[in-house]
Image: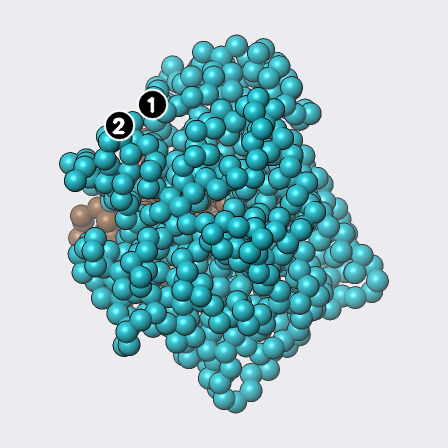
Chain colours: A cyan, B brown
Amino acid sequence: MGTRITVDPVTRIEGHLRIDCEVDGGKISKAWSSGQMWRGVELILLGRDPRDAWTITQRICGVCTTVHAIASVRAVENALQMEVPLNAQYIRNLIILAHAVHDHIVHFYHLSALDWVDVTSALKADPDKAASLAESLSAWSGNGKEQMRAVKARLAGFVNGGQLGIFTNGYWGHPAMKLSPEVNLMAVSHYLQALEIQRKANKIVSILGSKTPHIQNLAVGGVSNALSLDSPSVLTLERLMAVKTWIDELGDFVKNVYLIDVAAIGAFYADWTQYGAGVTNYLSVPDIPLDTKGTQFALPGGYIANGDLASHKPITTFNDEYWRKGVEESVKHSWYSYDTAGPLHPYKGETKPDYTDFQENAKYSWLKSPTFYGQVAQVGPLARVLNMLAAGHEPTKKYATLALDTVSAVAKTKVGLAAMHSTIGRHAARAISCSVQVDMLADQWSLLVNNIAKGDVSTFNKPIFPKGEQMGVGYHEAPRGVLSHWVVIDDGKIKNYQCVVPSTWNACPRNEKDEPGPYEASLIGNPMANPELPLEVLRTIHSFDPCIACAIHVTDKDGGDTFTVTAK
Amino acid sequence: MAKSARVLILGIGNTLLTDEAVGVRAVEALLDAYDLPSGVQAVDAGTSSMDMLDAIADVDLLVVLDALKAGKPLGTLVRLSGDEVPVFFRKKLSPHQVGLSDVLASLEFAGCRPKDMVVIGVEAENFGLGLEMTPAIAARVPEMVALLAGELASRGIGLLQKRKAA
């Protein structure tokens, strides 16, 4: 047996995740992913009014507030087989897309770039060369020499003032850091500009959702926004025009900075296209509904087996049987117990805690282990982009081609789609997805304005709860991938409720057949230069954009360092 | 502090986890009892982090209301200020790990961190699943609000008590 490493918790993520690895000959040979917090929100919902569920589920997590709200109203609407007015779909779509764009920008620049970018190296950069390099890659207006010189000066003041320590667990000077000082300076400059631009996406959510971070405007059956192009108290043309300005600024940044940076940085880390593939069954759901019934979508979704795009099977409507019948969750390796042996469909799902210690061959995580037709599946931007490509989605083809061409130009070698099944490929897919979504934001804005201009100001259909039992599933292609809420309603009250979240699909422990989950599988074969500084583990895990919150955040005033890396 | 000072009051915590809700409930109580003067904003931040960046940027004073575990007797009110605040957030093990600590780091780097920060916390221990706080902690909410009002008053910012509807 080789060296055993425990990273607990993985930092710069939402929630508490523990990763254990065995390292043999400088490579990871086995891995375990363990969610260290109990989620039991389902239990709070039992017996409540289904119309209130979304306000409770949006409190599950501080990053994913809107996505749990959306999935929840969709689940209840699906149970009641309701139609949702077009304006409500468009407004929800705008919130969904603005949130996704925000989430993707923040993830890359503020939560994961420090895995690849060495801030201290940027101090050695020639700012004029950094500007030339950046300008050769993109037409973005914020790459001039003055900007790069100013950023270098700010950085020098910051580092010399001893303030770099505020970035917890930065791996400055680690041997796995490979970017030139100029590329590092360019990335630091864009980090700062991304801080500015992400605010615009947040403002869109705030205006349309009436409030942020917890939106107020949803309702089972639609949205509560009052619409008019000329009344001052409601969603007016003036506000909509402000939203359009922010959409355009976001589009400029995402396509001319984010997508290009990921491609350029990816090209310098070409070795990371060889690591991190893990599970190559890819699941995504369609989203951005374009009709009242949820039968047409702007973003296609489906399932790809074994990385073969030709195997793509589409998921097409909110009532899709192929989707609905395929999902099960196992608790064989999770700290729960079921009344019966084997996995359960979410409608029959149970949430009974059964905590043991961390037992690597038995139970070791608070996450359940979901499967699609018995197969472990990866969800998230890579699954989304590959399924959209397989479905022939033209905007996705356009940005995937642009990204791969940029990588190929910087790397001076042809890099094809096969490179996407990797750690760096997940970052590339997130940027491609974000580019598609920011364009779609503009499309949805036009659809909303045109529809209101036609005189349609309807935003809400009143839900009616019949006697007896109804079941429904609401799915949503959230930033981190497939999110689904499954509800059973009995006489107008919630009888069962299960959330199958993206990070459960990806961060799950071994399943009923003892097969590793996507995080676990993706770590196998990763290099490990120094077990005391497991940067490589963070690179692959962060590439999934972990979000395991859903639980407690207690402060520990006198409690020393809580981050531990133990190698033994 | 001048009357035009920008002040942000953040109530943080997960409202699904019993006493974790106390910061959020204190903000709600504040908004129920007082009209805030211009320049002063109070936000139910839940467990959000990066979403709050825009609101936190460039404020003169950030006040965080939160539950905490500092090894004090249950229900003890704790006030932290100045340099204790960022250290306190960096050390804790929480969803806010990505949260306020990293938000403050980003703002620091961008040159727009809050000029001053205060945490008003209450020692709590029940963080199990539940929408209701325990009585011992719920009883502390008015004191947190009073401590907050005193904090603002000491900086020359007066809060106007709302008139109760007849």
As displayed, is residue A543 above or below residue A261? Answer: below
Query: Residue B33 versus residue A431: which sits nearer the camera?
Result: A431
Marks 1, 2: nearer the viewer = 2
* Contact? badges 1 and 2 (CB < 8 Å): yes
- Check disc 2 and give the amino acid type: Asn
Looking at the image, residue A151 sits to the left or right of residue A531; the answer is right
Chain letter belonging to callout 1: A
* Residue A340 placement (x, y as % from top left): 28, 76
Badge 1: how crowded within 10 Å, few (<14), some, or many (20+)? Answer: some
Q: Secondary structure at mark 1?
A: loop
Residue appearing at x 45%, y 39% in the figure? A422
What residue do we see at 16% from left, 40% from top? A1
> Which residue does the image show at 28% across and 45% down from the upper left?
A31
Q: What's under tag 1, amino acid-wise?
A: His
Q: Position of residue A93 (x, y in %)?
A: 64, 56
Extreme-bottom residue of the structure: A467
Who is closer to the viewer here, B48 or B151?
B48
In the picture, the disc for residue A563 is none
**Residue sticking out furthest to the right:** A454
Task: Give the quarter of the image for residue A291.
Answer: bottom right
If the image is split into quadrants, where does the C terminus of chain A sit? Answer: top left
Q: Position of residue B22 (x, y in %)?
A: 35, 57
In this picture, residue A178 sits left or right of residue A310: left
Mark 1 or mark 2, earlier in chain: 1
Badge 2 element: loop
Where does the image place residue B41, in percent across and percent down from the top left?
51, 46
Residue under pointer 2: A530
A216 to A543, vertically: above or below: below
Residue A174 is labelled as 1
